[in-house]
Amino acid sequence: MALRRVLSPLLLILIINFCYPTQAIDQDDLLVVAVASSENDGYNRFIRSLKVYGYKYEIYGLGQESTNAEQRMKIVRDNLVRYKDDKKKIILYTDVYNVIFTQGPVFVLDKFEGLKPARIVFGAEDKCWPDENLQYDYPMVGSNEKRFLNSAGFMGYASDIYEMITSQDDIKDEQIFFTKVFLDESSRNKWSIVLDKRADVFMNLNGAINELQLPANGDDVYVHNSWTDSIPTVIQGNGSAQKSLNYLSNYIARTWSTNEGCLQCKESLFDVTQIDDLMQWPMVYIGLFIEFPTPFLREYFEKIMKLTYPKQRLSILIHNQVEYHKNITEQYLKKFSEDEYKFVKYLNVDDDTTEAEARQQAIHECQEDKCDYLFILDSIAHIDHPDTLIKLIA
């Protein structure tokens, strides 16, 4: 009997080692999966970061109506079923619209290896939600560690993840479901679930903005968490942290470098001058706003007229709120009207159109006219380079 008690845990260890590979994970076995209903700026930013670092990824749900938590998990289950028996593939699930990757697959897998014997790893944060009372059920953590599960990002072996997300028929709330799975000791042990307590892989910015540092390694700007002293890879900016993520996106994921400045600005450049038919050039709606007495107003208008862009593809809206400038503005209004601009519209000081109303009108008319670009220029700013529009469109 005593020998049996000794052999049982050894047998369990042997079974686990047999079922799951012990050698280093091949980066081709890492797959990023996410659910998105439409492509927008946040989506494009997310995809760009994946491509920059060479991730393999699958996006589910595109073209469908906006999805809630229950629908998202159903979509994930339906698509991961083909990996349900795969004990080599590593699935990394994350949100889309508020997430940026800042390192490549090798870094992620090294960090995942460092968390073994864990087979599923969830992101962690400082706040227990949506039920704060559950905080008392969480295991204690060390200093400078994150204690509470965040369901916006997790990774693990495909077979384990599929088994976990199909252990309940309907998952109406991801955060509640995964929290209960983690807090249940038998489930936690069954799938060897741990939290990324030191934000090695996942960092949620919500409530952690003060922990951020942005050091640079050559041309690569990365995120350093000063609280956990880690370099996280998957940066999540949900809720009130979205603006902070937008700020970070100007620098991380090889967007900017200390030597070359803006790197993303050099991607997917569009040389409009290669279009021979001028009527096929993008349509630009220009809003000119004279809201305060302004010196050198004549030069301001002259520089607009010297733009090296087909006038047939330019629409002009002028809003003048300064009586003193009425004469000179109407002189140039006549010049604009006599030229080949698509149309010219003038809102003068007598129209009682406020600045806010005029700016909103510019946006509305641009949309109504199906313009490709809206270019706003206040009278206090001058265009010194005639090819400014061409360079901005590039």
Image (cartoon, grey):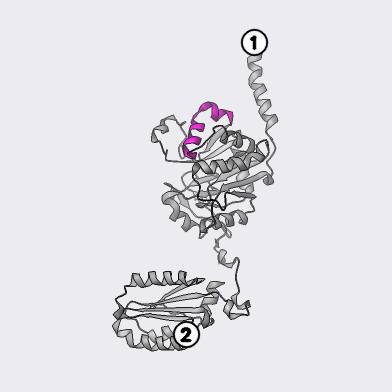
In the image, the segment drawn in magenta is 172-191
Specify the amino acid type for callout 2.
Met
- The answer, for residue 221, to whether it is visible in the render is no
Specify the amino acid type for callout 1.
Met
Image vertical order of residue 317 relative to residue 181, above or below: below
Which quadrant would the C terminus be assigned to in this image?
A: bottom right
Q: Nearer the viewer, residue 179 or 256?
A: 179
Image vertical order of residue 143 relative to residue 53, above or below: above
Q: Residue at x 45, y 48 (%)?
A: 211
**Left or right: 186, with 84 as reference point:** left
Question: Does the segment drawn in magenta span residue 173?
Answer: yes
Q: Quadrant of residue 219?
A: bottom right
Which quadrant would the N terminus be assigned to in this image?
A: top right
Q: Residue at x 67, y 46 (%)?
A: 27
Q: Residue at x 55, y 76 (%)?
A: 390
Q: Main secondary structure of the magenta part?
A: helix
Where residue 209 appears, x then y in whole percent? 43, 50
For the image shown, how many numbered marks are present on the structure? Answer: 2
Q: Which residue is mark 1?
A: 1
**Mark 1 element type:** loop
Residue 241: give its label. Answer: none
Q: Nearer the viewer, residue 170 or 305?
A: 170
Where residue 77 appears, x then y in whole percent? 59, 40
Badge 1: how crowded within 10 Å, few (<14), some, or many (20+)?
few
Q: Quadrant of residue 190?
A: top right
Q: Nearer the viewer, residue 105 or 222?
A: 105
Q: Which residue is mark 2?
A: 305
Question: Does the segment drawn in magenta span residue 182?
Answer: yes
Q: Residue at x 52, y 36 (%)?
A: 170
- The answer, for residue 48, to whether it is visible in the render is yes
